[in-house]
Amino acid sequence: MEPATPSWLPEGKTTAFALTIPVDCETVVLAEGRRFAQHPLPMSHQVYEIQRGVPRLLGMLDALGIKATFFVPGWTLERHPQLVEPIVGAGHELAHHSYSHRPPTDMSESEERADFERALEVMAAFGVTPAGHRAAYWSASSRTLDIVAEYGLRYDTSLMGDDSPYLVRRRDRDVVELPCHWILDDFDHYAFLPQPRIGRNVEAPQTAVGIWRAELDGLRRYGGLYQLTCHAFLSGRAGRTLALRGLLEYALSCGDVEFMTCGEAARRALAAPPARPRAGVTETQ
Amino acid sequence: MTGARRPEAPTGGWLAGAAAAMVLTFDVDGESPLLAEDARYAENAMLMSHQAFGPEVGVSRILRLLAEYEVPATFFVPGATAERHPRTVEAILAAGHEIGHHSYHHRPYVEMSEAEEREDFERALETLARLGAHVTGHRTPLSSASLRTSGLVASHGLSYESTLMDDDRPYMLDTGNGDIVELPPSWALDDWLQYVNLPIGESYRVKSPAEVVAGWRLELDALRAEGGLVVLTLHPFATGRASRLRALAGLIEYALDAGDVAVLSAAEVARRARADESLPRRSLDRLDPRPDPAVYPS
């Protein structure tokens, strides 16, 4: 079977590869409880990405000529403003990832809206108007896509209803959903902290990348969006970046895989929507 | 800051021309972590024997391995374990290896009062000194440092700690109580999550030693391209098991064959790092973000 080119991809391409890099920093730990600010070990573990993880990943992307999408919570941008210029200046996309990295599913509507707006304000102060949004922990509430539509963002990437982009109609607007999946998340392979308890498993990088490569090859047969999520505090460790580089080099060598930012994937999906439009989460429940 | 395949191994400085440094650290916990959690575990003979395997069998096997390859190592021993297994401490010292401070009780410092933490810290120092160890470094048990711990390390005249995880090379830590060297470990280089499985509390899936060591070797290779520090954190009750120790032997052999990896004790890396003024100096204060309760209400 020769897979056809999906409507939204360039001729001859089967798969869009969107590398997404959350830079959560301390927010992941603070969202588990404010008291953990008094625990220097988890704080140190999270700021690794400021010292090493982000610069190492940026260097690798530069060497390969790949543009990625960085999701950075507003709180993190305020605390580590030096993050912005190396990401944006190198032509990568900076996208909305909440202000506090607290899960919207645990918030009231007014809390969720206030957190969303505050992140937009912080990004605006850096001159960034985000094209898209990813909910903290992918924990979108039933309201999240309404808010994304209301503020005019082009895409969301928190839902898992397909492995191609799909349109969700909210507030009389089409929001592109760029679906994600746990298979393609480094958190399950690499994340661990004893206190607060985060993650439960640390795999060898070769094992994680083996799983990711199998999914890439599978998706090349069906056609779709390969959205890989690599946290800078996890995949920014030296051996893991090296293993990730091997995967990216493999994808570059395939010929039918097109690298793009999430913003670009969303733009394409809006212009030539994929064949299987979805009604959206609420409507299908 | 470069792609991992663009070598820029620094010459001189703390690496003295090597591409990377590797430190083998062994946390000789023995029975202490379980007894600290619940004294009733003393009545569980299986658990006690499982933990005693570390100091009683694992360490002697590890010492033979280190002698075979003529490489140094650092053993972090809780005071309570040292008192329970004094001959293990003697054997480590007799083989010329470093003993480091790893608390007395192996209880989480972050959950102690200031007085409790200080008492535990000093009791461990006294215990190790009485057993003849010259201690210059500390690792907090259970990765449970408090905001006071590094200051205790500095004020007691120790040279370094190996606890915080924000880098993969040494740096100077301004504790507010004096400067110490930080030698950062990493969960990616820790055998606990790979091998430890007990029918109580937290357990992890037991992995194949070949797979585990392949991951560590990749980290070593990547850090060789950057002039990094590989701090392996190994537990004799876990890594002391036969197949795992053979896999570790393979990693040591690989590092030695590479020709550009300096296998050093933690104390030696700290000594070199202190002399290297190019290393960054960072404050402990930067790890306390003082979050706004309005943003993080709970």
Image: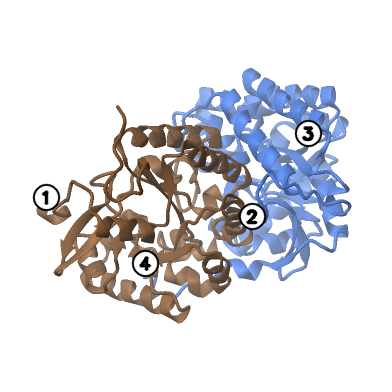
Chain colours: A brown, B blue
> Which amino acid type is shown beneath numbered disc 4?
Ser
Reading the image, the residue beneath label 4 is A98
Q: Secondary structure at mark 4?
A: loop
Q: Could you say where residue B163 lies in the image, as x and y percent from the top left? A: 66, 52
Residue carrying label 2: B164
The image shows residue A112, relative to residue A24, as above or below, that is below
Q: Out of B115 and B180, give the one closest to the viewer.
A: B180
Distance in Å between CA atoms under marks 4 and 3: 51 Å
Dot label at residue A284: 1
Badge 3 is on which residue? Answer: B89
Mark pair 2, 1: CA separation: 47 Å
Residue at the image position 84 percent from the left and 44 percent from the top: B18
- Image x and y of residue A276, in percent: 18, 46
Toward the bottom, the furthest residue is A125
Crowding at mark 4 (Cα within 10 Å: few <14, some 14-19, many 20+) = many
Other-residue count near label 1 (Cα within 10 Å), few / some / many at <14 / 14–19 / ≥20: few
